Amino acid sequence: MNSIVEKKLESLPSKPGVYLMKDQDGKVLYVGKASSLSRRVRDYFGPNARLHAMTPNLIPRVKDIDYIITDNEVEALILESNLVKKYNPRYNVRLKDDKRYPYLKVTSEDFPRISMTRIVENDGSKYYGPYVHAKATRQTLKEITKAFPIRTCDLNIEEGKTDNRPCLDFHIGRCLAPCAGMVDKEEYQEVCQSVGAFLKGDSRPVIRKLMDKMNQAAADLNFERAAHFRDRIENIEKILQKQNVTSSRGEDQDVIGFYRKDDEACVQILMVRGGKLLDKEHFFMNGTEESSSTDIITAFITQYYHDASFVPKTIILQDSPEMPEVITKWLSEKRGSNVELHVPQKGRKLSMVEMASKNAKSILERDKQQKVFKQDDNPALIALKDILSLPTQPHRIDAFDISNMGGNMAVGSMVVFIDGKPEKSEYRRFRIKTVKGQDDFAMMREVITRRFRGALEEDKPLPDLLLVDGGKGQLNAALIALRDVEIEESQPIIGLAKKFEEIYLPGQSEPIILSDRDPALHLIQRIRDEAHRFAIAYHHKLMEKTMSVSILDYIPNIGPKRKQMLMQYFGSIENMQGASIDDLRSVKGITQKIAEDIKKYLSSNSG
């Protein structure tokens, strides 16, 4: 202990606050909180040093200590979280890349709009999240606009100014068109409040209010308005039907479990709102190798809820955090009412924590395995060589799959992985030409025959390993194809049966079954799944082409361009059938005469 540290220890006050341990260059190594700075920091030094796994590595590097006094322990907790984000200290457990997580934002304008953002600002807007996956967040946004007609555009709207024309979202029921004066401020704000309640998981009052409006409209014989509210209720219920019921008591809960390996941990949070599993997200944390379970759970709670838009009444935890009373007080202040931290020992709540922990383990192991795939010296390929007794490590792997839905437009796919990575320029698609019906084995034989015959004729490279999606039947079909082109003996080949992930080899009656942790299995699963995805995508593309003929093609003066404009504007033929002639004329290029022809033809063919 140097003289600077010694003097700082003597001057530390017995007050709550935050301490910063620094190295000789002034870099912050560790940030901690304390109810008594003097007592807590002294615990790290001297013969009775505070026992902690990181202490032997941290303390020799500490050349200076700084501190900030706070009014109370809750303020110290908040300040610690801010400083960990600011300095990213080596010896703190840190929520990884927390700034990248998306939120849903509802602005504070007279006519608020909803959007996805990654930046939380103190601008009066309301933020909901954080979420993890941008794609899933965009889908959530899409579902919300189906149920609640809130705008997503960035127009600057002032009440009373109606210069704008309603856009497509208005015509398909996803916006109330405040830009065109189609709704007053009070009614629109009510929709925005419903959005906020729904995103917080409180859907019951929203549905009750819509039910009341629907019944009132029906009583007033305004059946069109009643149908409008009915459709909104149905859209909300469709979203809710996708959620799993976890409790019959309608609680708001977060269930937090984690799994730690080496210097990284994955934390999964199950979000239960109104007794339903509304969402689940996972987060990665760095710097956990020398940290206890208490350190990990404390760091996650303080850093995650620091920015979270909603704090539930109950938070169910895998382990107790440090200073639980202080954390409970802080969370209760954020929520505006009492919050309970609970570490279950038995029953349903323990099962949910275990489920979160198991999922976190699976996610972390998958993430680490994907990092392995990106390494130049790939252990999965090395393991595959040994397991399959290949002469060399497989540099090129070709995988085949068949997509055959009811025997209609059957297709085959080939994907290529070079050194464990996809080589998309080598991918190939096949339309089945010689096989009728649903004979997958014959289709596999056709595809592989065509691929290898073409490769031999054009002197193209052959794979070090051939992988077919399926068990003995598909493997035998592939072997016949290889025999047809006279390379059966020289071509290494395996079949991967999906149900039990069994690996079949030529001439062996019993399959090879690998551990679900084996990197070799993870690699061939990934390749097989990519072949399946590529085949399905091609099949869907062909199906879309056959369905591209539209009823609009039979209307005079409707060519490809006008057809495209109409579909972009209305979204579907059903929406077009309900449109007036004036609505149809709103589309660029549609004259009065053409609008009348469209209306007449669609009306006569609506059945």
Image (tube, helix red, strand yellow):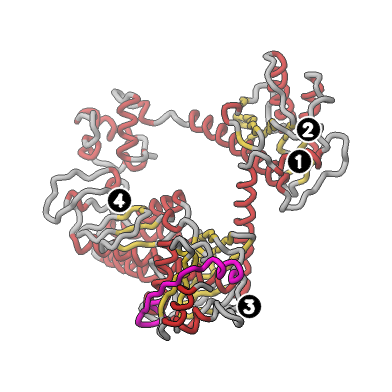
Q: Measuring from the top left, give residue 513's x and y in whole percent.
A: 80, 48
**Disc assigned to residue 565:** none
Q: Is residue 177 visible?
A: yes
| In this picture, residue 343 sits left or right of residue 584 | right
**Disc assigned to residue 347:** 3
Q: Which of 584 and 440 lies nearest the eye of the viewer?
A: 440
Residue type, label 4: Thr
Q: Which residue corresponds to the image point at 28% horizontal and 45% vertical from the top-left? A: 171
- The residue that mark 1 highlights is 384
Q: Measuring from the top left, give residue 485's x and y in whole percent.
A: 78, 19
Q: Which residue corresponds to the image point at 38% horizontal and 66% vertical from the top-left? A: 309
* Tag 3 and tag 2, C-beta contact below 8 Å: no
First of labels 4, 2 by sequence position: 4
Q: CA distance from mark 1 to mark 2?
A: 10 Å
Which residue in the rendered view is the most extreme toward the bottom? Answer: 14
Q: Which residues are magenta?
A: 54-76
Q: Measuring from the top left, give residue 417's x and y in whole percent.
A: 65, 33
Q: Measuring from the top left, give residue 440's x and y in whole percent.
A: 71, 33
Other residues around mark 1 within 10 Å, as few (<14) / some (14–19) / many (≥20)? many
First of labels 4, 3 by sequence position: 4
- The residue that mark 2 highlights is 392
Other residues around mark 3 within 10 Å, as few (<14) / some (14–19) / many (≥20)? few
Q: Which of 450 and 210 lies nearest the eye of the viewer?
A: 450
* Tag 3 and tag 1, C-beta contact below 8 Å: no
